[in-house]
Image (spheres, rainbow, N blue to C red):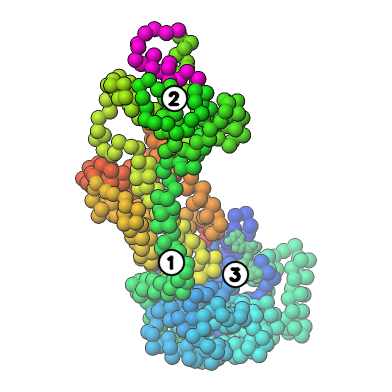
């Protein structure tokens, strides 16, 4: 008769917990809990919903830490270096199915098998056996095509695949029909008997726990009773475990003291306490290979989404080129011309009295003109939003203009007003108002040039006494599209990359698949590296498509090196990826990540100097903006493309430095959060 309760027999215990405490915030979930599972036994842990069973199991597999107390699994402390747990010596089946819906059963087994260090041949062999036992009919069907109960069986098959010494199963029989439940129990009993496997499971089907060697009843954060089922029935003089637990709950409620029952006299299954099977642990490289393989297979299963993801940045860039920075094409300008209502006139003549017609004719190229009979009519149309601007030309416009320019004789002050064209604008649409100002001024400049030529007067007479020389960089016209495009690339690439990476991690978190692979000994670092590899390939595709669209389709030109440009875009996207990982390591829910990323996007765009120069910002923001991700890189890429500077120029290399500093900051945040975040 063996009961490995205390020091003498500790080596015979697969699992020991003493005075284990764990809380989530102020809520105490495990409260000085003791639990002992002898090797080669099946231990059924029972308890009401929310009593802390899952929390306890996740501490045992190293997914969570105890606040205090002692815990041993196969003689080692879970979570410590060199411990059996997490690792393939301990198999964990979480409460959720924790399967990848895009994989087939065969691929699922291959993935988990590789992580556990099995060869592909061994996996195929075991799969055949397990599929028969658990009645999994078509192993080449996608997981998503199986019912909930079938997925539960597949989830169970995964944990049996690599023959761990200890099985920790969170409600393995939930959703299974009674016949299948029976065969699962037979299989577990056989594992314990023949392979000396130790099994700790939770179940809400209390009566099935009769088949276990030991049952533990958890209530108020600790195991109230721990005993072989028959002993329990005898002690409480009842026929069912349900009655025994009802009685226990009643006694516990009535008692002011902490009730604990331990019945140790009954026989335990003492058949063999050695290891059932030697399990080879996979190397880090093998685990990363399995993770990367799975991520590529999962990606390839949704080609539409993959194509959309790869093309998303290039689509944004294409839309940017099509919509941003071009002159407005469909604006309507009203003209109330009191001098003439003619709309077609011959070229300006020095003594013409319808010069306004020539000027208005030139306005046609910038806007759609609407000829009006009075200023009042125009003003009411402007007020009702039917016009973007209104030009009013006085009755004696030509004569006064001529007198003003040609005769150079003093005239009454008020008469100058007749040579002035009044322009009303809707200034709420500031860009359109600025455009109206530009094109009316340009048209006037052209008109006055033609008019002065017709009078044989030098056109320089009306020029401003300022000479605009050729720009050192850029063309004479302000090219909003070309100037804004590079920064827009970076912004888009950064945020798309951060969304891709954060969602890929959070989807796995929400499906609890990480719980399973963490319990198999996969580390955070291995997960991060595998994501860096797969997401980097995705980002590479996105950047290539984006640059092709910008340079080849929309003819963006570069005065500098394309390789430096592409490298900066890539470094910036990599920074976006790391930003996504940092966020995903801090937050738990996909929707929070989306809110955070979209909340960061607008300030980042505004602070990057893309929409408005940094020099115009509040002085504090000017400095702060400089250190943000993307802002510096946006400045650098403009220096490369529009100024032709190389990476040795500080203006360029500081963009790279800024990216790398942010990459390091984000990776440190990831590492720190993964290590120290409450588990
Ligand atoms: N991550 C968490 N943060 C905060 N509270 C948590 C967390 N996980 C679990 N809890 C709380 O801890 C308590 C125990 O939860 P646990 O999942 O361990 O119970 P359980 O016995 O497994 O329940 P069930 O039988 O329904 O699965 C519950 O009140 C639950 O709300």
Q: Please tell me whether mark 1 or mark 2 is closer to you in this view.
A: 2
Measured from the top left, where is residue 532 in percent x and y?
Answer: 37, 63
Comes first in the chain, label 1 or label 2? 1
Label 1–label 3 contact, CB within 8 A? no
Label 3–label 2 contact, CB within 8 A? no
Q: Residues within 10 Å of mark 2 (few under 14, many from 20)?
A: many
Q: Which residue is mark 1?
A: 307
Q: Nearer the viewer, residue 565 or 344?
A: 344
Instruction: Kindly report the distance in space between the C-alpha atoms of the residues bearing marks 1 and 2.
Output: 61 Å
**217 in relation to 663, above or below:** below
**116 in relation to 579, above or below:** below
Measured from the top left, where is residue 639 in percent x and y?
Answer: 28, 43
Residue 324 visible (yes or no): yes
Q: Secondary structure at mark 3?
A: helix
Magenta-drawn stretch contains 402: yes
Comes first in the chain, label 3 or label 2? 3
Comes first in the chain, label 1 or label 3? 3
Q: Nearer the viewer, residue 553 or 452?
A: 452
Q: Secondary structure at mark 1?
A: helix
Magenta-drawn stretch contains 5: no
Instruction: Kindly report the distance in space between the C-alpha atoms of the residues bearing marks 1 and 3.
Output: 39 Å
Q: Nearer the viewer, residue 238 or 163?
A: 163
Q: Which residue is mark 2?
A: 354
Q: Is 447 on the left-hand or right-hand side of 44?
A: left
Q: Which residues are magenta?
A: 395-412
Q: Which residue is mark 3?
A: 54
Q: Is 211 on the left-hand or right-hand side of 143?
A: right
**440 in relation to 293, above or below:** above
């Amino acid at each position: 008769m063996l009961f490995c309760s205390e020091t003498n027999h500790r080596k015979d215990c697969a699992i020991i917990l003493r005075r284990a405490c764990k809380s989530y915030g102020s809520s105490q979930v495990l409260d000085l809990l003791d639990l002992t599972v002898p090797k080669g036994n099946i231990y059924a842990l029972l308890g009401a919903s929310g009593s802390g069973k899952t929390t306890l199991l996740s501490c045992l597999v190293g997914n969570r830490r105890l606040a205090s107390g002692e815990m041993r699994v196969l003689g080692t402390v879970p979570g410590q270096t060199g411990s059996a747990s997490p690792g393939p010596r301990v198999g964990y089946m979480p409460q959720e199915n924790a399967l990848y819906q895009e994989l087939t059963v065969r691929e699922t087994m291959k993935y988990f098998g590789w992580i556990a260090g099995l060869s592909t041949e061994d996996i195929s062999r075991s799969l055949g056996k397990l599929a028969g036992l658990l009645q999994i009919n078509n192993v080449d069907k996608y997981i998503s095509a199986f019912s909930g109960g079938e997925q539960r069986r597949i989830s169970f098959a995964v944990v049996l695949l690599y023959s761990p010494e200890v099985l920790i199963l969170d409600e393995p029989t939930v959703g299974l029909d009674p016949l299948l439940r029976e065969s699962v129990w037979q299989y577990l009993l056989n594992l314990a008997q023949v392979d000396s496997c130790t099994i700790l499971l939770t179940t809400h089907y209390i009566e099935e726990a009769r088949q276990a060697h030991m049952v533990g009843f958890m209530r108020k954060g600790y195991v109230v009773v721990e005993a072989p089922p028959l002993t329990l029935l005898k002690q409480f003089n009842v026929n069912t475990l349900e009655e025994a637990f009802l009685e226990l709950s009643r006694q516990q409620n009535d008692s002011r003291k902490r009730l604990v029952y331990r019945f140790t006299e009954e026989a335990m299954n003492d058949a063999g306490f050695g290891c059932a099977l030697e399990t080879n642990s996979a190397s880090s490289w093998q685990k990363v290979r399995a993770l990367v393989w799975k991520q590529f297979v999962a990606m390839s299963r949704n080609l539409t989404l993959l194509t959309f993801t790869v093309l998303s940045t290039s689509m944004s860039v294409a839309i940017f080129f099509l919509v941003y920075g071009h002159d407005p094409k469909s604006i309507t300008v009203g003209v109330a011309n009191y001098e003439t209502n003619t709309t077609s006139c011959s070229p300006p003549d020095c003594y013409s009295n319808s010069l306004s017609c020539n000027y208005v004719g030139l306005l046609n190229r910038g806007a759609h003109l609407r000829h009006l009979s009075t200023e009042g009519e125009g003003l009411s149309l402007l007020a009702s939003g039917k016009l973007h601007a209104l030009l009013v030309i006085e009755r004696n416009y030509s004569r006064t203009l001529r007198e003003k320019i040609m005769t150079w004789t003093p005239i009454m002050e008020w008469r100058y007003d007749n040579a002035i064209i009044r322009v009303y604008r809707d200034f709420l649409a500031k860009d359109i108002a600025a455009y109206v100002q530009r094109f009316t001024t340009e048209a006037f400049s052209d008109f006055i040039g033609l008019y002065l030529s017709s009078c044989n007067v030098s056109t320089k007479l009306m020029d401003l006494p300022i000479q605009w020389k050729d720009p050192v960089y850029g063309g004479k016209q302000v090219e909003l599209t070309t100037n804004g495009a590079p920064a827009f690339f970076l912004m888009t690439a950064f945020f798309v990359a951060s969304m891709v990476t954060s969602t890929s991690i959070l989807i796995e978190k929400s499906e609890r698949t990480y719980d399973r692979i963490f319990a198999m000994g996969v580390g955070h670092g291995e997960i991060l590296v595998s994501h860096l590899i797969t997401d980097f390939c995705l980002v590479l595709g996105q950047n290539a498509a984006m640059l092709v669209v910008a340079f080849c389709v929309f003819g963006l030109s570069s005065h500098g090196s394309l390789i430096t440009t592409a490298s900066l875009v890539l470094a910036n996207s990599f920074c976006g990826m790391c930003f996504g990982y940092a966020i995903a390591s801090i937050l738990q829910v996909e929707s929070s990540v989306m809110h955070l990323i979209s909340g960061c996007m607008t300030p980042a765009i505004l602070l990057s100097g893309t929409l408005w120069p940094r020099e115009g910002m509040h002085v504090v923001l000017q400095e702060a903006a400089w250190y943000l991700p993307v802002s510096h890189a946006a400045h650098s890429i403009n220096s490369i493309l529009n100024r032709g500077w190389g990476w040795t120029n500080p203006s360029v290399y500081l963009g790279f430095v800024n990216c790398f500093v942010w990459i390091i900051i984000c990776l440190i945040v990831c590492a720190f959060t993964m290590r120290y975040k409450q588990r």
